[in-house]
Image: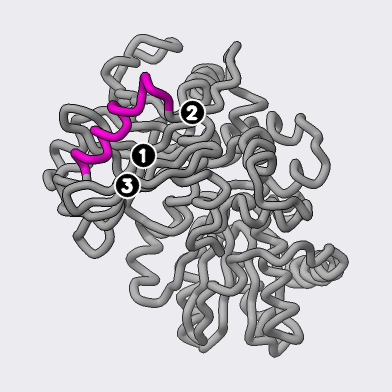
């Protein structure tokens, strides 16, 4: 429990510190943030993706002042649900109608507090490091009263603009290894990415979900990082890392996904049961995490490229799947209950893999009656037209600027 005077002092100190922060490189997401009075704008994303900096950019662009409070602060360790009353009194005392709350989900009962503020016509911005913020009690209390967006690490286009790189194959190769965690892109200090993994596993998963076996969870994390672009199933992993139950693996998959470490892409099927029982392809949210934490003796540039194409699609579309018939197509995109895109990824098309890659893509195009498909390569260009369909080989640096921003 905290006194109102203590809360006021912490707000003042944090506000001063907040305003001293560099407004930084303008994020592409800044143009897309939905804002409405009496609605909560919720920004989620992996730790260190730049959510607080984005809030500062919103403040500088839209408002003259606000109340800012970051709850992941040792000075607020004693903050309890009952302290929201004192926080509310302090906010009312200041007469400010715009509120920025970082990591407020750390405090039990925060949904009721935010709902009260919305009823009083405050404009509220919330950031959090867990995708499940929109579930459970929050879904009950804030139904129809929240606007949500996800902030990812630097996209490829943000990466090249931040570093003033030309858009070419060399820039793609650099991004394939560095990824887009802003602090790492700025400094190149590799320990930033290894400590980030530990922070997420401990603070966003172990504490939140009462996971005791951190060592096994970390082994699983390294295993998944090492196997990006491959399929994984809980049943086949059972017994590894000292984890016997497939249901425990499924729980861990869910925790890792909610913490934005990984995405698990399902096989496309009109049946949700078929999607659920088939293997899912695993991708990391940032390729720098793969570089610094995976255990591999190979560069795996092809797997990196496939992961990168997934991230580009994930930034734009909610529903991304892989397709399988006789062959396989790496990605199909679902929009408004209709598959609209089929995309294959191949680092380098050769005589040996040409037919396989083409046939997998053609099968997907035929299944969904698509007339256009793409094969994303590192640096090859070509176009093939036959029987009313067009398949284009697209260099990655061209593909990654399509629909960017």
* Spatial separation of the CA atoms under disc 3 and disc 2: 22 Å
Residue 325 colored magenta? no
Q: Residue at x 64, y 76 (%)?
A: 99
User: Residue 3's image quarter?
Assistant: bottom right
The reply to whether dot 3 and dot 2 touch (C-beta < 8 Å) is no
Of the two numbered discs 1 and 3 on the same chain, state the one appearing first in sequence.
1
Which element carries disc 2, helix, strand or loop?
helix
The one of 323 and 349 positioned closer to us in this rendering? 349
In the image, residue 204 lies at what x, y percent? 55, 41
Residue 356 colored magenta? yes
In the displayed structure, does residue 300 sit left or right of residue 250? right
Which of the two discs, 1 and 3, sits closer to the camera?
3
* Spatial separation of the CA atoms under disc 1 and disc 3: 10 Å
In the image, residue 291 lies at what x, y percent? 64, 27
User: Residue 5's image quarter?
Assistant: bottom right
Q: Give the crowd class for mark 3: few <14, some 14-19, many >=20 residues within 10 Å.
A: many
Q: Residue at x 63, y 86 (%)?
A: 97
Indicate whether 103 appears above or below 268: below
Which residue is denoted by mark 3 in the rendering?
391
Which of the two discs, 2 and 1, sits closer to the camera?
1
Which residue is denoted by mark 2 in the rendering?
303
Which residue is denoted by mark 1 in the rendering?
344
Q: Residue at x 23, y 55 (%)?
A: 371
Tell me which secondary structure the magenta stretch mostly adopts. helix
Of the two numbered discs 2 and 1 on the same chain, state the one appearing first in sequence.
2
In the displayed structure, does residue 351 sit left or right of residue 58? left
In the image, residue 124 lies at what x, y percent? 57, 76
Q: How many marks?
A: 3
Magenta-drawn segment: 350-364
The one of 255 and 58 positioned closer to us in this rendering? 58
* Spatial separation of the CA atoms under disc 2 and disc 1: 12 Å
């Amino acid at each position: 429990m905290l006194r109102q005077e203590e809360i006021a002092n912490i707000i003042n100190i944090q506000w001063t510190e907040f305003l001293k922060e560099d407004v930084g490189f303008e994020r592409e997401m800044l143009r897309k943030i939905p804002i409405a009075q009496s609605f909560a704008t919720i920004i989620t994303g992996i730790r260190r993706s730049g959510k607080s900096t984005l809030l500062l950019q919103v403040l500088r662009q839209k408002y003259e002042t606000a109340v800012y409070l970051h709850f992941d602060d040792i000075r607020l360790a004693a903050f309890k649900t009952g302290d929201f009353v004192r926080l509310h009194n302090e906010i009312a005392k200041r007469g400010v109608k715009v509120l920025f709350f970082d990591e407020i989900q750390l405090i039990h009962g925060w949904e009721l507090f935010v709902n009260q503020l919305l009823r009083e016509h405050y404009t509220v911005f919330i950031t959090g490091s867990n995708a499940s913020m929109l579930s459970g009690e929050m879904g009950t209390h804030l139904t129809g009263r929240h606007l949500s967006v996800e902030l990812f690490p630097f996209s490829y286009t943000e990466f090249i603009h931040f570093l003033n790189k030309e858009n070419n194959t060399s820039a793609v190769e650099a991004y394939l290894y560095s990824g887009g965690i802003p602090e790492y892109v700025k400094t190149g200090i590799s320990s930033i990415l290894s400590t980030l993994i530990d922070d997420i596993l401990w603070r966003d998963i172990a504490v939140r979900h009462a996971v005791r076996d951190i060592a096994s969870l970390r082994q699983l994390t390294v295993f998944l990082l090492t196997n990006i672009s491959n399929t994984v199933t809980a049943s086949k992993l059972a017994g590894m890392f000292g984890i016997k139950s497939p249901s425990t693996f499924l729980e861990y998959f869910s925790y890792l996904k909610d913490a934005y470490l990984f995405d698990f892409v399902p096989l496309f099927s009109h049946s949700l049961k078929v999607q659920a029982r088939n293997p899912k392809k695993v991708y990391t949210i940032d390729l720098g995490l793969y570089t610094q934490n995976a255990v591999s003796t190979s560069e795996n540039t092809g797997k990196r490229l496939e992961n990168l194409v997934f991230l580009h699609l994930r930034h734009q579309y909610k529903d991304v799947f892989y397709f399988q018939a006789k062959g396989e197509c790496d990605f199909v995109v679902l929009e408004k209950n209709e598959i609209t895109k089929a995309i294959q990824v191949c680092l380098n098309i050769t005589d040996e893999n040409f037919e396989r890659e083409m046939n997998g893509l053609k099968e997907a195009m035929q299944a969904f009656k698509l007339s256009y498909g793409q094969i994303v390569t590192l640096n090859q260009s070509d176009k093939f037209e036959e029987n009313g369909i067009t398949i284009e080989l697209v260099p990655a640096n061209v593909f990654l600027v399509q629909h960017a921003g």
